[in-house]
Amino acid sequence: MTKNKNATPTPTLSDSKVKLGDVARKAGVSPATVSRVLNHPEIVSPELRERVSRAVTALAYTRDSAGRALKSRRTRTLGVVVPTLGISIFAEGVEAMQNRLSEHGYTLLIANSQYEARRELQEVASLLEHGVDGLALVGDAQLPETHQLIRQHGVPYLTTYVATARDEVQAIGIDNEGAAASMARYLLELGHRHFGIIANLPESNDRSMSRYLGIRAALAEADVPLPHSHVISMSQTLQHGRQGLRQLIQSNPEITAVMCTTDTLAIGALAEARSLGLKVPQHISITGFDDIELASQFDPPLTTISVPANEIGRAAADHLVNAAAGVRIPVITTLPHRLIVRGSTGPAPGLVRRPKLHRTAE
Amino acid sequence: MTKNKNATPTPTLSDSKVKLGDVARKAGVSPATVSRVLNHPEIVSPELRERVSRAVTALAYTRDSAGRALKSRRTRTLGVVVPTLGISIFAEGVEAMQNRLSEHGYTLLIANSQYEARRELQEVASLLEHGVDGLALVGDAQLPETHQLIRQHGVPYLTTYVATARDEVQAIGIDNEGAAASMARYLLELGHRHFGIIANLPESNDRSMSRYLGIRAALAEADVPLPHSHVISMSQTLQHGRQGLRQLIQSNPEITAVMCTTDTLAIGALAEARSLGLKVPQHISITGFDDIELASQFDPPLTTISVPANEIGRAAADHLVNAAAGVRIPVITTLPHRLIVRGSTGPAPGLVRRPKLHRTAE
DNA sequence: CGCCAATCTGAAAACGATTTCAGAGGGCGG
DNA sequence: CCGCCCTCTGAAATCGTTTTCAGATTGGCG
């Protein structure tokens, strides 16, 4: 009997050391009962429940998450790995996810991969080591080891921003390919026949790749050729959007429609078009993807596809919370996207060619 | 005897249940030694160290963070509460912080307050309950309870994006007031005498308030009046930036310089200026604050002040990691900001008044 | 050559909460 | 009126790791 916990250790000083046992003593019940009141209030008699809760508030008791996690094998913590928070749709999704989790008493551990699959694996490993109860990834371009590692830990997980994923991984997102295809078809209907594409296609960005493939497919279907020189890969910045457009137009003056896999690129392209003296959409149509805030405010406002990042984040949160609680509903959720037509697109210029450019395609 | 862990349970299947004891057995040492190898390798003999590490990798053992946290009273987890991730400088700061922490083996719990002090308190409470080893906040407008709560938990914390904070709270950030003042002085030097301000001033946004006060002070110093009607408070969106500029100019046509407390507002203002037929900077100068990516790419590029969000995040991470390790160096770090002059500002228009506006100030 | 000190290792006691397993008490049916 | 079952509570074991405390081994020094 080494310990004598008789002397109340200066009650007011509140060592922030209040533990379950203290509450139990104060309420005159056993620790077990306190725990029950906290976790399954319905199974304890109203009278005790009341007494215990009173003690809890009186002592300002808060559970110690470490002890709790140890015994219950759950940390009430979820993890997410996004490519970067610097891209607003990811920031938005993460924020939505966090907000939803917060309602459920969960918190979100966050990590970013900088679009590198290897790094993603590391971060996943780190999150798993920290004992997350669930994990959200982005896209469908993980290393095989990543999936293996997660599965081996028996942690529920899913991927986001895509509608389908290989290998039976659950996914919540939009149909990037289909969306891009519909955008291409929209431009085809406007009479465009000469397309340029600015895409950011690092290895690990399968979303952009899907969008690109969607465009490709739609054009092929309409027998519209898409020469290699009409496709430019650029990393995702305004700067590169500018550069992409310039390259595209200077070497292929016949292009009347430039499709970007990202709004950021598209807005860069818009800016550059203006610098080049090209009128949008009279001379050239430009489209984006994501519908970031700026898209609607730019001049001209950008035709783009809205990605419901909020819904994605929220749905991911809900799903993972359920899964962590043992309710494992397999879901492959395709959220709706919207084609938003704004001022940056218009009918293909007919005979009227662009003025400023030195040589015309004709 | 419910458990018989004699039979190696299909070694390959690796139940992810490998625990310290298993490693110890495999290496033929005591659990204590394994723990030591993992945590203080230097105090264990090279031979055993080697043997243990071999066992660790052989079994692919990873520490259970729950048990570890319980005993060591540290979670290797830090928390951050930002107003929102939707604002790029916060997203950038959080990302930088996360990257740095990742190097130290920490992970970051993230929460957002939506600019509500009450909400901030809740999120802080939640993070503390989850046992974070340290906490980063933003700004200096927390509820008193928030500080009290954190201190009572004995958790190191600091605030960011401001250079000083009340009540001896540590801070890492820039001198918002000074920066804004220098911007105002710059405009004064250009001859501007009629200022308008678009600020987002919710209660809990002390950064914007500081910036506003800085401007106010600089103008007062130069005996330039700033009527109430020249100050408009707007929430931080492009849309509101537009609206702000319109209101400002329509009711005060004499204004030649509009200072915004945020780039987002400023770019909205720029866009609206164009819509109104005002040439920037010939007719009107517009300034921002933050130097977001778009600032340099917009047409005209925005004169603004760069906030070193990356450095802030990194420094916060470093400081908290140290503090969590027991090294509590009091720091109040003022990081340098830069006034970046671009095309959106120019000399105050002399006699030449703006054309499009129905009535002139004269 | 022997003893003390210095290393290094192992046994065992926490850390704080959850939960199984029974037991106590009360209500209802026979 | 008695017994059985059901509900609710408490005792105690347990989650996996860290760390004190001592013991054992070895080396150094007198």
Image (tube, coloured by chain):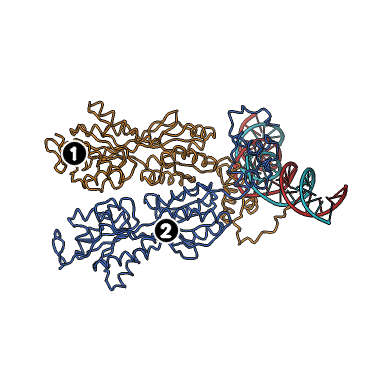
Chain colours: A orange, B blue, C red, D cyan
Q: Nearer the viewer, residue A91 or A68?
A: A91
Residue position for label 1: A346
Residue at (34% x, 38% y) in the render: A200
Which residue has dot 2 on it?
B161
Residue A128 — which label?
Answer: none
Visible in this render: residue A31? no
Q: Quadrant of residue B183?
A: bottom left
> For numbered disc 1, what is the local secondary structure?
loop
How many marks are shown on the rendered structure?
2
Question: Which residue occupies 61% across, 27% down?
Answer: B10
- Which of the chains bears the disc numbered 1? A
In the image: residue B220, left or right of residue B328: left
Residue A251 locus on image (x, y percent): 22, 37
Res. B325 image quadrant: bottom right
Please tell me whether mark 2 sits on a helix, a strand or a loop: loop
Name the image quarter holding the C terminus of chain A: top left
- Report which quarter residue D6 is drawn in: top right
Question: Pointer 2: residues within 10 angstroms few (<14), some, or many (20+)?
Answer: many
* Amino acid at the residue labelled 1: Gly
Could you tell me which chain the residue with mark 2 belongs to? B
